[in-house]
Image (tube, helix red, strand yellow):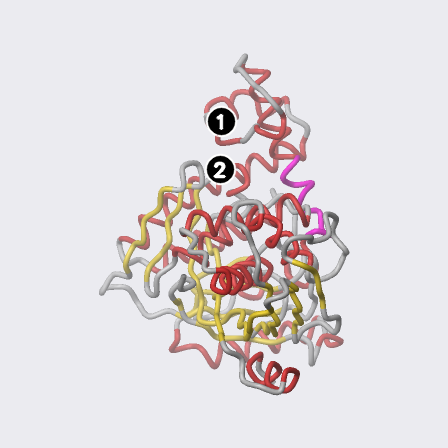
């Protein structure tokens, strides 16, 4: 059942409005944006759909086809504290939007996600989709920058996830057949077109069969370890430093890290090692894409995945196995965990000529290792896509 059909069934009429926000993939640049690094990414042709209509009394009444509980609140009196369910992201978005614009009209809505939850920025896509609906009904037009900031604020301040701008930026700025090359320090970005000389490619999403909640993971701890490394490096180097929460590795030159890294606790050093390495990989990846070298770009994505396992130290046994299988499967240019890397899925950049054998080979080896996940594990082939239409 689609969101459109679910709305018709529930409200006995066709939905007056529909909207769509794509998921995103980030082959190089993971775990970097929260420290003001650089990223590369794509929107994909799968995502979040919403079917909705207005409620003039200001009530938000919304249900997801992925969760049983229907959620309700008022646009002008949203609960100030999270309630611990899937709709917290949308409550946070309502508050962030209402703080900037006077909301009067609520909505009744059905939301549906095309792919399993975990690793494709579904939370950011849900927030952006919801905001686009709420803005339409209240006559509000947001700039892309406002949409990204409000979406990020909902996750940071209300849900409590210390994410950066990667997810939202990919879902807003991306363009089909282009690589988004974004500097989260100043939000400058470039959409690098696919070279006519580039070999064909598609994205394969290998869902491990295990979903995850980002807020309940060790994601925030990793961010704090990066920030702690930056704070300590500044102190060792005699650099000025202010508030801890405003300290980022982007403030610290690579030479300072190399000079003082041996003084850092091992975990802090590893997190910083990943961040600086990822910064270099992103710059090399943008050049490879510009040159039309999908193989070089894919190799850098594999290197990013390796660093995520050994320096960032994320990855469940299932995701690590998927990554290892991908590195030795013919027809895969590159890939890594998608998203935080605790559960969820892996992303692979594949040669379409090997699509069937890639699916068969990865599936066979993965389910041999985790036979109990048969029926939960799945594979999805995607292409690049445009970002959300405002």
Q: Is residue 240 above or below residue 103?
A: above
Q: Residue at x 51, y 25 (%)?
A: 258
Indicate yes or no whether the magenta region holds residue 216.
Answer: yes
- Number of other residues with Cα within 10 Å of mark 1, as a class: few under 14, some 14 to 19, many 20 or more: some
Per the image, the residue denoted by label 1 is 251
Q: Write down the region rendered in magenta.
A: 215-224
Camera-side residue of 104 and 18: 104
Q: Earlier in the sequence, mark 2 or mark 1?
A: 2
Q: Position of residue 214 (x, y in %)?
A: 67, 54
Helix, strand or loop at mark 1: helix
Q: Is residue 280 above or below residue 304?
A: above
Q: Residue at x 60, y 72 (%)?
A: 109
Per the image, the residue denoted by label 2 is 36
Q: Is residue 191 left or right of residue 338?
A: left
- Number of other residues with Cα within 10 Å of mark 2, as a class: few under 14, some 14 to 19, many 20 or more: many
Q: Position of residue 294 (x, y in %)?
A: 35, 60
Main SS, magenta region, reads: helix
Q: Is residue 113 above or below residue 247?
A: below
């Amino acid at each position: 059942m689609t969101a459109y059909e679910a709305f018709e069934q529930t409200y006995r009429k066709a939905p007056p409005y529909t909207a769509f926000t794509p998921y995103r993939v980030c082959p190089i640049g993971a775990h970097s944006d929260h420290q003001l690094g650089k990223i590369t990414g794509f929107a994909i042709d799968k995502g979040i759909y919403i079917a909705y209509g207005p409620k003039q009394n200001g009530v938000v009444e919304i249900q997801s086809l992925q969760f049983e509980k229907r959620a309700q609140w008022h646009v002008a009196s949203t609960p100030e504290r999270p309630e611990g369910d899937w709709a917290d992201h949308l409550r946070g978005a309502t508050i962030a939007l209402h703080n900037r614009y006077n909301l009067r009209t609520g909505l009744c809505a059905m939301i549906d996600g095309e792919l399993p939850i975990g690793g494709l920025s579904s939370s950011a896509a849900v927030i952006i989709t919801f905001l686009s609906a709420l803005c339409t009904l209240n006559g509000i037009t947001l700039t892309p920058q406002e949409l990204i900031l409000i979406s990020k604020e909902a996750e940071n301040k209300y849900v409590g996830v210390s994410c950066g701008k990667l997810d939202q930026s990919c879902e807003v700025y991306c363009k089909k057949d282009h690589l988004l090359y974004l500097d989260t320090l100043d939000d400058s970005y470039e959409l690098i077109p696919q070279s006519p000389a580039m070999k064909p490619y598609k994205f394969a999403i290998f869902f491990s069969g295990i979903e995850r909640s980002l807020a309940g993971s060790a994601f925030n701890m990793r961010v704090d370890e990066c920030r702690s490394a930056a704070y300590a490096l500044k102190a060792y180097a005699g650099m000025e430093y202010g508030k801890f929460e405003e300290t980022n590795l982007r403030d610290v030159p690579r030479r300072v890290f190399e000079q003082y890294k041996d003084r850092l606790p091992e975990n802090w050093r590893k997190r910083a090692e990943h961040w600086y390495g990822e910064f270099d990989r992103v710059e090399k990846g943008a050049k490879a894409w510009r040159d039309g070298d999908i193989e070089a770009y894919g190799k850098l994505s594999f290197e990013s995945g390796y660093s995520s396992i050994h320096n960032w130290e994320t990855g469940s046994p299932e995701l690590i196995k998927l990554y290892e299988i991908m590195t030795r499967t013919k027809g895969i240019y590159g890939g890594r965990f998608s998203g935080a890397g605790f559960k969820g899925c892996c992303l692979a950049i594949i040669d379409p000529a090997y699509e069937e054998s890639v699916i068969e080979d990865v599936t066979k080896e993965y389910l041999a290792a985790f036979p109990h996940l048969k029926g939960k594990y799945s594979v999805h082939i995607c292409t690049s896509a445009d970002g959300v239409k405002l």
